[in-house]
Image (tube, rainbow, N blue to C red):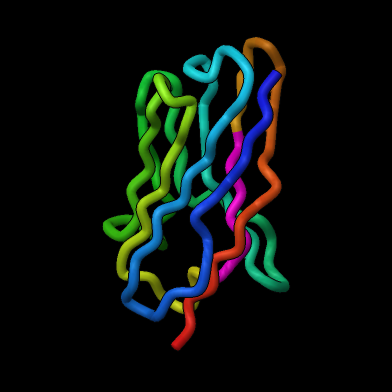
C-alpha cells in the first residue's frame, strides 16, 4: 500500500517554472506506473505525463517540450518539471500510482498550480 503526497505547487507568472514532487510512503514504489494528472476548473481530469516502472515516458501533446516527468525510486519520489508555464496550465495537479498486477491504484491529495500575472 502507498500513500502519496504532492508538493511544489504555487503561483507563478506566465513563462515561469515550477517543479512538483510526489513522495510515497510504503513499499514497492519501483513496481508502480506513475502519472501526473490535472483538473482545471470546470474541466475533466486529464493525464499530463506518465512514466512506467520500466521508465517509459509519455506526455499529453499540450505539455510536450515544456514538462519533464522523472522518478527516483531510491527516494520513492516522482517529479514534474514544468517550464514555460501558460495560464492554461492552471489546475490542481495530482499524482497517481498504479500496479495493474496487484490491482492497486493510489492518488495524492493534489497541489494547486496557478499561472497568472
Is 64 inside the magenta-drawn segment? no
Q: Which residues are magenta?
A: 90-96
Instruction: Report x, y in % for residue 10.
Output: 52, 67
Residue lying farthest to the bottom in this orientation:
117
- Depth check, front residue: 86 or 1: 1
Q: Residue at x 38, y 28 (%)?
A: 72
- Depth check, front residue: 53 or 111: 111
Numbered circles on residues, count: 0
Q: Quadrant of residue 92?
A: bottom right
Indicate whether 104 appears above or below 101. below
Instruction: Report x, y in % for residue 88.
Output: 50, 75
Q: Residue at x 63, y 35 (%)?
A: 4
Instruction: Report x, y in % for residue 21.
Output: 48, 44
Residue lying farthest to the left in this orientation:
65
Q: Residue at x 43, y 33 (%)?
A: 51
**Is 38 left, or right, of 16 in this rendering?**
right
**Is 17 left, or right, of 30 in this rendering?**
left
Is 95 inside the magenta-drawn segment? yes
Amino acid at each position: 500500500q502507498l500513500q502519496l503526497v504532492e508538493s511544489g505547487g504555487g503561483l507563478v507568472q506566465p513563462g515561469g517554472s515550477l517543479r512538483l514532487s510526489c513522495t510515497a510512503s510504503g513499499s514497492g514504489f519501483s513496481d508502480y506506473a506513475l502519472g501526473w494528472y490535472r483538473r482545471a476548473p470546470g474541466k475533466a481530469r486529464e493525464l499530463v505525463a506518465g512514466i512506467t516502472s520500466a521508465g517509459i515516458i509519455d506526455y499529453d501533446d499540450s505539455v510536450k517540450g515544456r514538462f519533464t516527468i522523472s522518478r527516483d525510486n531510491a527516494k520513492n519520489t516522482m517529479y514534474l518539471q514544468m517550464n514555460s508555464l501558460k495560464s492554461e496550465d492552471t489546475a490542481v495537479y495530482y499524482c497517481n500510482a498504479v500496479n495493474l498486477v496487484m490491482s492497486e491504484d493510489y492518488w495524492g491529495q493534489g497541489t494547486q498550480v496557478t499561472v497568472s500575472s
